[in-house]
Each structure stands twice: as structure tokens, then as C-alpha cells.
Image: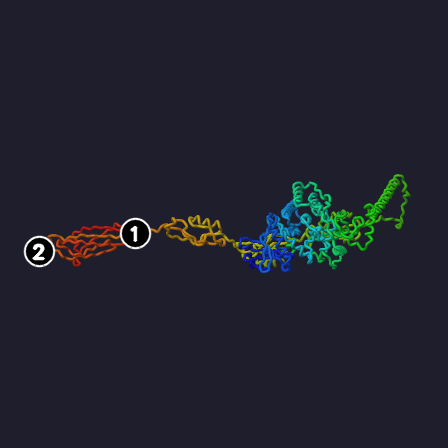
Amino acid sequence: MLKPGMILCDRYEIFEVVGAGGMSIVYKAKDHRLKRNVAIKMLKPEFVNDKTFVTKFRIEAQASAGLTHPNIVNVFDVAEDDGIYFIVMELVEGITLKEYIHENGRLPMDRAIDFSIQIASALETAHENHIIHRDIKPQNILVSKNGNLKVTDFGIAKAASANTLTSGAMGSVHYISPEQARGGYSDERSDIYSLGITMYEMVTGRVPFEGDNNVSVALMHIQNEMVSPREYYPDIYASFEKVILKATQKKPERRYLTASALIADLKRVQNNPNIDIVVAPSAISNSPTQEWSKEEIEAVRNAAQVKPAQPNVFFNAPVQNEMGEMRPVQGLSTIPVNNQRINQLLQEEDPWEEEEEEYIPQQPRRGSIKKVQDYDDDEDYDDYDNYESEGDIDPNLKKAVMIGAVATAVIIAIIVMIVLGKMMGWFKFGNKKTTTSSSVTAEAVVEIPMEDVVGISEEAALKILKDAGFTNVQSVHETNTEKQEGYVFEQSIAKGVPTAKDAEIIIKVSAGAEEKEIPDVKNYEDAQAVTILQEAGFTVTHAYEYSEEVEKDKVIRTEPGGKTMAKEGSKITLVVSNGKEEKNAEVPNLTGYTQAEAENALTAKKLKAGNITHENSDNVAAGYVIRQGTKSGSEVPEGTAVDFVISDGPEEKQVTYTADVRVDISAPQGETDADGNPVSYAGRTVTVRVSNGSATQDQTVTLNTEGKASASVSIGGLASNNENFTYSVFIDGTDVSGSFGKTPSITYREN
């Protein structure tokens, strides 16, 4: 058994078990390559070890992978990983048709017809591709949440049947065609028979044949006529009943020869329920004749004599889960049946047995025929010889006809005499009344054996008892957890007891279980919720969903909901959280988008914007994405944050200026000292100071003979080319600016 988290073929991750069958276990899984959930059907070890079976299995599964139809479960892959053989199929969220019938009871006519058309359409496509299913049954039909049907296991039953019929499994014995039960040739019409049985179950809620073991059920398919659906439920369309009866004829040539023909009649019934359907066409002479071996004849003979311990070709174990049947892990209960009616049918001859239609060595034809189990010696073969020699007229039949004719004549004569006697007064022997009790003659009470009606619907039970002649039948409705609502669970007089026609007969009909409040287990752990619901008297099944709010393995809700009323023992579905669904998304290319466009593109992919930064760019215009943190085209989990950078355009350069300042100074002329002597500045050293308030530059110069000099300084790092400069002249530290004329000149240049 595979464990959650295991990965097959480096691709398929196992999640959980969703079903099991006679030959396989089915898991929910994820295909990481194609990012989708799938169903993995793994062969059980006993099949894996049979290399011949594995080869057939692969061939048939690969053939069915070519089928494409909305009502067929797609097969994606057939693979093997370290000795594990498995099929990868479409995952259908829903339940089997068997579970659907079990939960909802018999289906309304319109739904049953719609379901039948969907199944037949799937068969039509398969048959056109020369693929026969061989195991059509409600367990192999899935009902999705939207009401669409999907037929599964196409091509698999062929490989399975060759392997399992000889190893102790009969297959789907409740739905098997007579020719399959004999081990003979099966074709498209075998699928149509099995679909007919499935349609029967859809409208009645039961299969037509039930028995203690596989052999008895298989023999019923071969020998017995089933109770007509309308005998159980008169509201079934007569036309739909005829379609079912035609599809389930014992002889393949009397059935619908193709699924297309069946669909045509189903659509006619769907459009006009009152239409007439022809049930039994003329026999076709070229039907393939099947031979039985002596061992097979002996096996069926023994089986019909109810010797389940004696070996035979069918497998005499109790009826169980059959080949390929998909069932919930916790299983399902079965619907009870009327065993008395089945036993009654077992005593009847096959009405379709015809001369030379089926060849059984050393067995007489109809006319002198006995039941198979009644052949004890060879005396009947002598009768058969006489029968052949007398012009195909059975001497026993001729004798019976003669006796019947004589008896009829005698009865008619007696009736005539009684009528004439009353008219003529022949029977008036006196009107004396006697007073002695010994002379009083009581009218004889007519008693008939009581019918067995336990396990069938109230409507059908009342009809059976009325048809048997009982006139005083009362129904009492009581709560009952064992029987389905509307079905008889007890009768006041036991089966077979001689009973007067007017005796009071009470049948107890199940009103279902009492209603109880469903506990509210939302947000409980799965195991804890199961315990609470089971202790409250309910059965539990599971469904799983992803949830953003509820933790993994905790209950999201129940169906029906908590604190609502439901009948005790009814099925409650626990919807359990699988946690947040991890889906991947492809990262879009954000380059060249505006910030708003980039955020919208991420949201559309179920991603979100991460850290948004800005930088200068000489190549990308301001306001557009320069680059992103996660590579475009890569796969990341939904909800991932993606970083990206927005352009601020080209970088703005900081322009500074340098002022080149030239100051021409001149000493005053004709200046005298205190003694009146002329002052000469020639050759004197002066300091010229240039300042703009924030920067100061000094330069020392020597005056020429005329008392003149020029000072040139440069002051850089200026933010403007229009600075306000001041100029000062110092001699020996004394500011003599007022004595010197100044002629400044300023030139600016960019740094």
C-alpha cells in the first residue's frame, strides 16, 4: 500500500486512498509535470506477480487510453515503478452510481433515462473502437457533482476476466450476461445486458437476482426470468420497462444489437413515455453456439441442486465484492430481496429455450426436458428419440392435451347441469331446518400459504398479497434502523403458513430511523469528529477540499450541516481540509510596465507585488519597470511576492562653478605723510583679499613704480554663477582698502 507523500516515476505524488476493489487500490495523486490532480489505480500484489496478466493488463489499458468521450474516464498513462504497476486516470470528484442509488433510493424516471443514455453513449464509442467493457455495473460508473456520468475501467475487464475466472472470482455476478456466466463468447451485446441490469437497479433500487452464492446468481441469469420492474413499482414507464426487458433478454440476438439502437429507443421514451417498444424480435439463426464440457454440465447440475461445497467452474463462495468493483473503504450495505419470489422463479422453465439455439451435448430438447439438476439417468433420452420420430410432437405433451380436453368437457357439463337444475328445481329436496348442532354444516374455510413480503416495498407487498387473494391486509409504519424506509421488515403471519383469505394480516413497514440532531463538528480534528458522529448514531464518510481558512485535517463542514436533523444511522459526509491548495503560477514579464500595470499583471496571475524600489536609468524612462526580482516565465506558488525596480529617469548632475576674480588696485597719488612729504607705495607688498561670504581667498602682490598691481584668485565649488564678491587690500595687516582704487573682473566656469 502506498503512503501519502510517495512519488512514483518522479512525477506522481500520492495524497490519499479514495477507493479499493478486487484487483486494485485507487489513490488521489498529483501530476507535478502537468500540474493537475489525477487518480492512480495500483494493481494488488497478487496480480503483479502474474506476468501474463500484467502484459494483458498493459495492452488493454493502453487500448482504452485511446477512448475520448465525455462519459468515459480518461486514461492518461500506464506505468511501472519498482514493481508497482499502475494506471493514471482522470480524477472524478463524486461517488459511484451504486453509492448514489444506496443514498437516494430508486431514481426518478427522467433521471434514470438520462443516466442510461449517458452510459449507453459511452458504450457506443467503445464498441465503435472495438473495445468491449465486460464489467458494466453501478460500481464502475461514477456520478460527478454536476450529474454527469463517467464509465471507468474500459479495456481492463478483459485482462482481468481471463485471469480471475480461473482463480476463484466470478466477476460481477449480479450484472453478468448469461453467455458470460457460461464462460462463453461475449461481445457488445453482453455489455448491453449488463447495462439493462443496471437500468433495472436504477428504477427498482435492487438487482433482479439474489442468491446465497455466485453459482446460484449465475444460474438465475441463465435459467430464470426476472420479476418485471413494474411488478414492484407500477409508476415505472411501461415503455422504459420494455427497454429494460429487451436489453436483458437471455438470448443475445433478442437484445439490442448495438448501443446506438438502445440509445434511439431511450430517447424515444424520453420524448414520449407512452410510446410502444418491441421487446422480442425474431431469433437470428446465426447466433454463435457454445459447447459445454462435461465438467461444466456437472458443475451447473451440482450448483442447481444447491451443493455449495462441491467444486464447480463458477466459485461457490458467498457473494462478495466482485472483480474490479470500486467501493468506499468502509463498504456499503445491500438492499434486501424477496427470496421466496426468487425460489419460485427457480422452479420455472426457460421460456426462451429453443431448438438448436444452444448446443449441450447429450441433453434433450424442450418438450421432454427436465431441469438440469433432474437428469439422473438415461430414460429421458429414450423419450427424446420417440419425440423426434413422431414428427416433432412430444408424446407427453399430446397426452397432457388429451387429458385437459376431457377435463374441460366434464367441467362444462357439470356447470350446464347445475344451471339447468336450479332453473327446473331439481335440487329442492326440502326446506326443513334442524336444531341439532351435529347437523349444522359449516362452509369449508379456504386457506392458502402465506406469501413472504419481508424486504420489499410496501406498495409491492400489498400488491403481492392482494394478487394472492388476501383481503384483510393492514400496514403499520414504525421506526426501524435496519430496513430502508418504505420497506416491509416484519409480517404477522410467517411465510408458508396456511391462512384464510380474510384473516387479518399486519405488515410492519419501516418509517426509517428517528431523526436526531447532527452534532456541529466544524474545526474539530478529523478523528475526533468521526467519534462524535458515530456516538450520536450516524455513519460517516469523507470528502476533502482545500481551504484557506481551516487547517489541514480539520473539519470544514458536514453534509448535511451541523445542528440540522437527520435520521439515525444515515450517512454524514465529513468535509475535511487539505489545507491551502498549493497552485503554481507563471511569473509575467514586467519590464516596460508602469507600476500600476505591473501590479495588475501580477494580480491576474494570482501573485502580488513585493518590494518596489527606484533608481536612475539613462535607458528606461521615468516611471517604468527597469527589472524584476523573479525571472519571468518561471513557476512559483500562487500568492508569491515579486520584487521590481522603477526608473527615475537619467540622474541629475550637480553643476558647480569656479569664479576667476581679477582685481586691479592703484595706490593713491599725491598722498603726503604727517610732515608733508609725498608718500610713495612703489615696491610695497600688499595683500588682496577676495570673499563671497562663505569662501575667502588672499593673494599677496608687489606694487610697481606707479603704485599699481593686479591680483588674480580662483574660488571654486560655487553653486551659482552670480556670486557677490567683496574685495579688501591690506598693507602690513592694516586695511587700506579705502586708499586703493579697485577695478574687479569676474569670470565663471563650470566644474
- Tag 1: Cα neighbours inside 10 Å, few (<14), some, or many (≥20)? few
Q: Of 322 and 498, which appears nearest the observer? A: 322
Q: Of 440 and 161, which appears nearest the observer? A: 161
The numbered disc on residue 677 is: 2
Q: Which residue is mark 1?
A: 655
Residue 200 picture location, percent across and down: 69, 48
Q: Earlier in the sequence, mark 2 or mark 1?
A: 1
Where disc 2 sits, the SS reads loop
Q: Is residue 252 left or right of residue 614?
A: right
Give the position of the N terminus as an image quadrant. bottom right
- Tag 2: Cα neighbours inside 10 Å, few (<14), some, or many (≥20)? few
Q: Would residue 162 be seen by someone viewing this image from the given angle?
A: yes
Q: Of 556 and 535, which appears nearest the observer? A: 556
Q: Amino acid at mark 2?
A: Asn
Q: Is residue 635 left or right of residue 97?
A: left
Q: Amino acid at mark 1?
A: Val
